[in-house]
Image: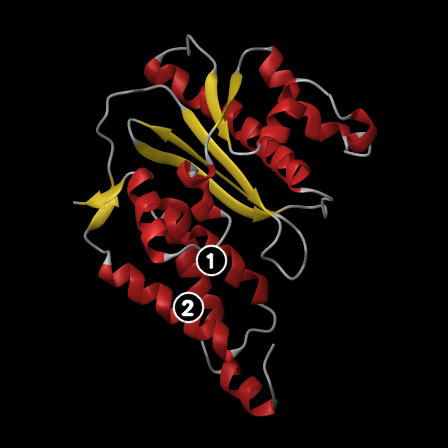
Amino acid sequence: MPADATEVAYMAKVPYHKAIGSLIYAAEATQPDITFAISTLSQFLENPSHVHWEAIKWIFQYLTSTKTHTLTYRNECHDLIVFTNADGTSQEHHHAISGFTFLIDGGAVSWASHKQELITLSTAKAEYMATMDAAKECIWLHRLTEPLFGAASTPTTLYCDNQAALHLAEDDNYHACTKHIDIRYHFIRQTITQKQIAMEYCPTEEMMADILTKALPKYKAAIHVQNLGIHHA
Protein backbone atom coordinates (compact mmCIF):
# COMPACT_ATOMS: atom_id res chain seq x y z
CA MET A 1 0.00 0.00 0.00
CA PRO A 2 1.14 3.62 -0.57
CA ALA A 3 3.01 5.03 2.44
CA ASP A 4 1.45 8.50 2.44
CA ALA A 5 -0.68 10.98 0.49
CA THR A 6 2.29 12.01 -1.65
CA GLU A 7 2.76 8.46 -2.87
CA VAL A 8 -0.98 8.13 -3.51
CA ALA A 9 -0.88 11.24 -5.69
CA TYR A 10 2.18 9.93 -7.54
CA MET A 11 0.63 6.53 -8.24
CA ALA A 12 -2.57 8.19 -9.51
CA LYS A 13 -0.53 9.50 -12.44
CA VAL A 14 1.16 6.17 -13.16
CA PRO A 15 -0.36 3.89 -15.90
CA TYR A 16 -0.23 0.86 -13.61
CA HIS A 17 -3.42 -0.75 -14.93
CA LYS A 18 -2.37 -0.35 -18.57
CA ALA A 19 1.05 -1.81 -17.83
CA ILE A 20 -0.46 -4.82 -16.06
CA GLY A 21 -2.87 -5.36 -18.97
CA SER A 22 -0.03 -5.33 -21.49
CA LEU A 23 2.06 -7.72 -19.41
CA ILE A 24 -0.86 -10.10 -18.86
CA TYR A 25 -1.18 -10.42 -22.64
CA ALA A 26 2.52 -11.30 -22.92
CA ALA A 27 2.39 -13.71 -19.98
CA GLU A 28 -0.59 -15.60 -21.38
CA ALA A 29 0.61 -15.69 -24.99
CA THR A 30 4.36 -16.25 -25.13
CA GLN A 31 6.07 -15.53 -21.79
CA PRO A 32 5.44 -18.20 -19.14
CA ASP A 33 8.56 -16.99 -17.34
CA ILE A 34 6.85 -13.78 -16.15
CA THR A 35 3.51 -15.36 -15.24
CA PHE A 36 4.13 -15.57 -11.49
CA ALA A 37 5.39 -12.00 -11.27
CA ILE A 38 2.37 -10.64 -13.15
CA SER A 39 -0.03 -12.74 -11.09
CA THR A 40 1.48 -11.30 -7.91
CA LEU A 41 1.48 -7.68 -9.07
CA SER A 42 -2.11 -7.98 -10.30
CA GLN A 43 -3.21 -8.41 -6.69
CA PHE A 44 -2.39 -4.72 -6.07
CA LEU A 45 -4.41 -3.20 -8.89
CA GLU A 46 -6.72 -1.37 -6.49
CA ASN A 47 -3.99 0.26 -4.42
CA PRO A 48 -0.49 -0.10 -5.89
CA SER A 49 2.56 1.52 -4.34
CA HIS A 50 5.82 2.85 -5.76
CA VAL A 51 7.48 -0.51 -5.03
CA HIS A 52 4.98 -2.29 -7.29
CA TRP A 53 5.55 0.21 -10.08
CA GLU A 54 9.30 -0.34 -9.84
CA ALA A 55 8.69 -4.08 -10.15
CA ILE A 56 6.65 -3.44 -13.31
CA LYS A 57 9.57 -1.52 -14.81
CA TRP A 58 11.95 -4.34 -13.94
CA ILE A 59 9.73 -6.77 -15.86
CA PHE A 60 9.73 -4.51 -18.91
CA GLN A 61 13.52 -4.32 -18.71
CA TYR A 62 13.68 -8.12 -18.52
CA LEU A 63 11.47 -8.46 -21.59
CA THR A 64 13.63 -5.98 -23.48
CA SER A 65 16.80 -7.91 -22.63
CA THR A 66 15.22 -11.20 -23.77
CA LYS A 67 13.34 -9.96 -26.84
CA THR A 68 15.33 -12.30 -29.09
CA HIS A 69 14.18 -15.34 -27.07
CA THR A 70 11.12 -17.28 -28.22
CA LEU A 71 9.20 -20.43 -27.38
CA THR A 72 10.80 -23.20 -29.42
CA TYR A 73 9.46 -26.65 -30.31
CA ARG A 74 12.00 -29.12 -31.58
CA ASN A 75 11.84 -32.63 -30.11
CA GLU A 76 9.05 -34.08 -32.30
CA CYS A 77 7.54 -35.77 -29.25
CA HIS A 78 3.82 -35.10 -29.48
CA ASP A 79 2.93 -36.62 -26.11
CA LEU A 80 1.76 -34.16 -23.49
CA ILE A 81 3.67 -33.96 -20.22
CA VAL A 82 2.75 -31.72 -17.32
CA PHE A 83 4.57 -30.37 -14.29
CA THR A 84 2.51 -29.09 -11.37
CA ASN A 85 3.53 -27.44 -8.13
CA ALA A 86 2.21 -25.35 -5.25
CA ASP A 87 3.85 -22.99 -2.78
CA GLY A 88 2.08 -22.01 0.42
CA THR A 89 4.81 -20.32 2.43
CA SER A 90 5.74 -17.17 0.53
CA GLN A 91 2.48 -15.20 0.56
CA GLU A 92 1.19 -12.93 3.33
CA HIS A 93 -2.41 -13.84 2.48
CA HIS A 94 -1.58 -17.51 3.35
CA HIS A 95 -3.26 -18.85 0.20
CA ALA A 96 -1.02 -21.27 -1.66
CA ILE A 97 -0.01 -20.46 -5.23
CA SER A 98 -0.76 -23.19 -7.78
CA GLY A 99 1.19 -23.50 -10.99
CA PHE A 100 1.32 -25.92 -13.89
CA THR A 101 2.84 -26.13 -17.35
CA PHE A 102 2.15 -28.52 -20.23
CA LEU A 103 4.83 -29.32 -22.78
CA ILE A 104 4.72 -30.71 -26.31
CA ASP A 105 7.81 -31.13 -28.50
CA GLY A 106 10.02 -29.68 -25.77
CA GLY A 107 8.12 -26.39 -25.43
CA ALA A 108 5.35 -25.07 -23.20
CA VAL A 109 1.88 -24.92 -24.76
CA SER A 110 -0.20 -24.14 -21.68
CA TRP A 111 0.66 -22.70 -18.27
CA ALA A 112 -0.96 -20.98 -15.31
CA SER A 113 -0.17 -19.42 -11.95
CA HIS A 114 -2.93 -18.42 -9.56
CA LYS A 115 -3.91 -18.13 -5.90
CA GLN A 116 -5.80 -21.09 -4.52
CA GLU A 117 -9.35 -20.45 -3.31
CA LEU A 118 -8.87 -22.08 0.11
CA ILE A 119 -6.24 -21.77 2.80
CA THR A 120 -4.79 -25.26 3.07
CA LEU A 121 -3.46 -26.79 6.26
CA SER A 122 -0.44 -28.54 4.78
CA THR A 123 1.85 -28.56 1.76
CA ALA A 124 0.47 -31.96 0.69
CA LYS A 125 -3.07 -30.58 0.48
CA ALA A 126 -1.92 -27.52 -1.46
CA GLU A 127 -0.08 -29.77 -3.93
CA TYR A 128 -3.10 -32.07 -4.17
CA MET A 129 -5.38 -29.16 -5.06
CA ALA A 130 -2.87 -28.00 -7.67
CA THR A 131 -3.00 -31.40 -9.39
CA MET A 132 -6.78 -31.03 -9.76
CA ASP A 133 -6.33 -27.79 -11.71
CA ALA A 134 -3.80 -29.48 -13.97
CA ALA A 135 -6.15 -32.44 -14.53
CA LYS A 136 -8.92 -30.17 -15.83
CA GLU A 137 -6.52 -28.47 -18.23
CA CYS A 138 -5.22 -31.86 -19.34
CA ILE A 139 -8.67 -33.05 -20.44
CA TRP A 140 -9.18 -29.87 -22.46
CA LEU A 141 -5.77 -30.24 -24.14
CA HIS A 142 -6.53 -33.86 -25.00
CA ARG A 143 -9.60 -32.72 -26.93
CA LEU A 144 -7.64 -29.93 -28.59
CA THR A 145 -4.67 -32.04 -29.72
CA GLU A 146 -6.51 -35.21 -30.75
CA PRO A 147 -7.40 -33.88 -34.26
CA LEU A 148 -3.74 -32.82 -34.70
CA PHE A 149 -1.80 -35.78 -33.34
CA GLY A 150 -4.43 -38.47 -32.87
CA ALA A 151 -5.76 -39.89 -29.62
CA ALA A 152 -3.14 -40.45 -26.92
CA SER A 153 -2.20 -44.10 -26.63
CA THR A 154 -0.86 -43.72 -23.08
CA PRO A 155 -1.90 -41.59 -20.09
CA THR A 156 -0.43 -38.10 -19.84
CA THR A 157 2.39 -38.03 -17.31
CA LEU A 158 1.82 -35.52 -14.52
CA TYR A 159 4.92 -34.75 -12.47
CA CYS A 160 4.57 -33.70 -8.83
CA ASP A 161 7.33 -33.16 -6.26
CA ASN A 162 5.28 -34.08 -3.17
CA GLN A 163 5.12 -37.76 -2.26
CA ALA A 164 2.16 -37.33 0.11
CA ALA A 165 0.08 -35.67 -2.63
CA LEU A 166 0.93 -38.54 -4.98
CA HIS A 167 -0.29 -41.16 -2.48
CA LEU A 168 -3.40 -39.14 -1.73
CA ALA A 169 -4.28 -38.90 -5.43
CA GLU A 170 -3.85 -42.61 -6.03
CA ASP A 171 -5.41 -43.89 -2.82
CA ASP A 172 -7.08 -42.10 0.08
CA ASN A 173 -4.67 -43.27 2.75
CA TYR A 174 -5.21 -40.15 4.88
CA HIS A 175 -8.99 -40.03 5.20
CA ALA A 176 -8.97 -38.92 8.84
CA CYS A 177 -6.82 -35.91 7.97
CA THR A 178 -8.29 -35.04 4.58
CA LYS A 179 -12.03 -35.73 4.82
CA HIS A 180 -12.67 -31.97 5.02
CA ILE A 181 -11.34 -31.46 1.46
CA ASP A 182 -14.17 -30.60 -0.90
CA ILE A 183 -15.18 -33.54 -3.11
CA ARG A 184 -14.46 -31.59 -6.31
CA TYR A 185 -10.76 -31.63 -5.49
CA HIS A 186 -10.82 -35.43 -5.72
CA PHE A 187 -11.47 -35.17 -9.46
CA ILE A 188 -7.81 -36.05 -10.03
CA ARG A 189 -8.53 -39.60 -8.83
CA GLN A 190 -11.13 -40.08 -11.54
CA THR A 191 -8.68 -39.06 -14.27
CA ILE A 192 -6.14 -41.54 -12.91
CA THR A 193 -8.73 -44.34 -12.75
CA GLN A 194 -9.76 -43.60 -16.35
CA LYS A 195 -6.08 -43.69 -17.38
CA GLN A 196 -6.12 -40.12 -18.67
CA ILE A 197 -3.31 -39.16 -16.29
CA ALA A 198 -0.45 -41.07 -14.68
CA MET A 199 1.23 -39.28 -11.78
CA GLU A 200 4.95 -39.58 -11.21
CA TYR A 201 7.36 -38.11 -8.69
CA CYS A 202 9.73 -35.35 -9.80
CA PRO A 203 12.59 -34.14 -7.56
CA THR A 204 12.10 -30.56 -6.39
CA GLU A 205 15.29 -29.34 -8.09
CA GLU A 206 13.91 -30.54 -11.45
CA MET A 207 10.38 -29.16 -10.97
CA MET A 208 10.09 -26.56 -13.74
CA ALA A 209 6.69 -25.41 -12.44
CA ASP A 210 8.62 -23.79 -9.56
CA ILE A 211 9.02 -20.70 -11.72
CA LEU A 212 5.22 -20.37 -11.75
CA THR A 213 4.74 -20.47 -7.97
CA LYS A 214 7.55 -18.51 -6.34
CA ALA A 215 10.45 -16.13 -6.84
CA LEU A 216 13.66 -18.02 -7.66
CA PRO A 217 17.38 -17.23 -7.69
CA LYS A 218 18.57 -16.02 -11.08
CA TYR A 219 20.54 -19.17 -11.94
CA LYS A 220 17.61 -21.47 -11.12
CA ALA A 221 15.11 -19.31 -13.01
CA ALA A 222 17.38 -19.39 -16.07
CA ILE A 223 17.41 -23.21 -16.00
CA HIS A 224 13.63 -23.43 -15.81
CA VAL A 225 13.21 -20.84 -18.58
CA GLN A 226 15.24 -23.08 -20.90
CA ASN A 227 13.30 -26.16 -19.77
CA LEU A 228 10.07 -24.40 -20.73
CA GLY A 229 11.40 -24.14 -24.28
CA ILE A 230 12.37 -20.45 -24.29
CA HIS A 231 15.57 -20.15 -26.32
CA HIS A 232 17.45 -17.59 -28.36
CA ALA A 233 15.79 -17.40 -31.74
Q: Quadrant of residue 22?
A: bottom left
Percent x, y of residue 127: 61, 37
Q: Residue furthest left?
A: 233
Q: Residues within 10 Å of mark 1 (few under 14, many from 20)?
A: many
Give whichever of discs 2 and 1 has the lower sequence position. 1
Percent x, y of residue 191: 59, 17
- The residue nearer to you, when weighing 169 against 195, is 169
**Relative to 101, does residue 48 appear above or below in the rendering?**
below
Q: Residue furthest top?
A: 153
Q: Secondary structure at mark 2?
A: helix
Give the residue at x 49% y 72%.
Answer: 52
Quadrant where the N terminus sits is bottom right
In the rendered view, how is the structure colored? Answer: secondary structure
**Relative to 232, does residue 144 appear above or below in the rendering?**
above
Quadrant where the C terminus sits is top left
Q: Quadrant of residue 169?
A: top right
Give the residue at x 64% y 41%.
Answer: 123
Distance of mark 2 from mark 1, alpha carbons? 8 Å
Identity, as a three-letter code, of the amino acid under mark 1? Ile
Identity, as a three-letter code, of the amino acid under mark 2? Ile
Percent x, y of residue 132: 61, 30
Q: Which mark is residue 38?
A: 1
User: According to the image, label 2 marks what residue?
Assistant: 56
Q: Residue furthest bottom?
A: 6
Q: Which mark is residue 10?
A: none
Percent x, y of residue 76: 24, 21
Give the residue at x 51% y 55%.
Answer: 39
